[in-house]
Image (cartoon, helix red, strand yellow):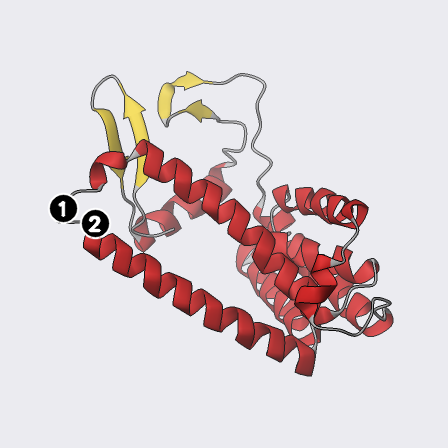
Amino acid sequence: IPDMPIYRENQEFGSHYVVFDAETIKAAAIKYAAKKYSDKVNEMHDQSKFIDGVVLFESFFVMATGLIVGGIIMIIVDKKIKHTTADVDPVLSLRAMKPVHAFVIGLFQALAVIPGVSRSAATIISGRFLGYSREAVTLFSFVLGSVTLGAAVAYDIYKSGTVFTIETTPTLLIGFIMAFVAAYISIGFMIRLVKRVGFVPFGWYRIVVGILFAAFLLL
């Protein structure tokens, strides 16, 4: 993510953060793909500490394929699968969700380790297969995401607790409140949107992006 601080630790600089702008990330990605560095895995970006036998499961073509295939599956599932759960409020539907169904959806989320397969798409597709409504699986995707993000935020706070000072705490609290409000509004908007148009437009979006991405790599 451009301009996002990344925690690093080494003997020369100790604990510190590094930041990359968008142009640097783009140049690094192009070089990575051109030179096929997937087997050049090192520790903390230290080129003297390569890890033998480890290959990054990261391929831009795999990413493009994942986007396209995921989009096709999303369209098919949305058109062919009809929800079998009671047509009630999505919150009530999730409260009645069977533990085994939550477990299965969690297993499907593991597919998100494949480039191009998103966690939300895995949740939506698996939830629809299990018979849940569009609104229910959309809400469930947000709920699961909040757990993941909450854990990441807690860990980041633990690693950088010194950032919280009298001067910075009000700014951070304002940012948290605004993010919460924006997320609340976004969830309501997305639930209303998928209820009206379904997931087909999102499926076509993934297909188009995947094709453009593959075309860019081949040019």
C-alpha distance separating marks 1 and 2: 6 Å
Judge by depth and name the residue closer to the eye, 59 or 10. Answer: 10
Q: x%, y% of residue 101? A: 79, 50
Question: Mark 1 = which residue?
Answer: 166
Where 28 falls versus 211 (above or below)? above
Query: Dot 1: within a 10 Å radius of its alpha carbon, few (fewer than 14), some, or many (20 or more) residues?
Result: few
Judge by depth and name the residue closer to the eye, 70 or 79. Answer: 79
Which quadrant, please, contains the C terminus?
bottom right
Question: Mark 2 = which residue?
Answer: 169
Q: Is residue 139 left or right of residue 17?
A: right
- Quadrant of res 70: bottom right
* Amino acid type at mark 1: Ile
Where 42 falls versus 131 (above or below)? above
* Amino acid type at mark 2: Thr
Residue furthest bottom as drawn: 196
Q: Give the residue at x 25% y 17%.
A: 11
Q: Give the residue at x 32% y 48%.
A: 4
Q: Give the residue at x 85% y 71%.
A: 82
Q: x%, y% of residue 144? A: 60, 51
Where 83 falls versus 115 (above or below)? below
Circles 1 and 2 in contact, beta carbons < 8 Å: yes
Q: Is residue 120 left or right of residue 86?
A: left
Where 52 falls versus 202 (above or below)? above
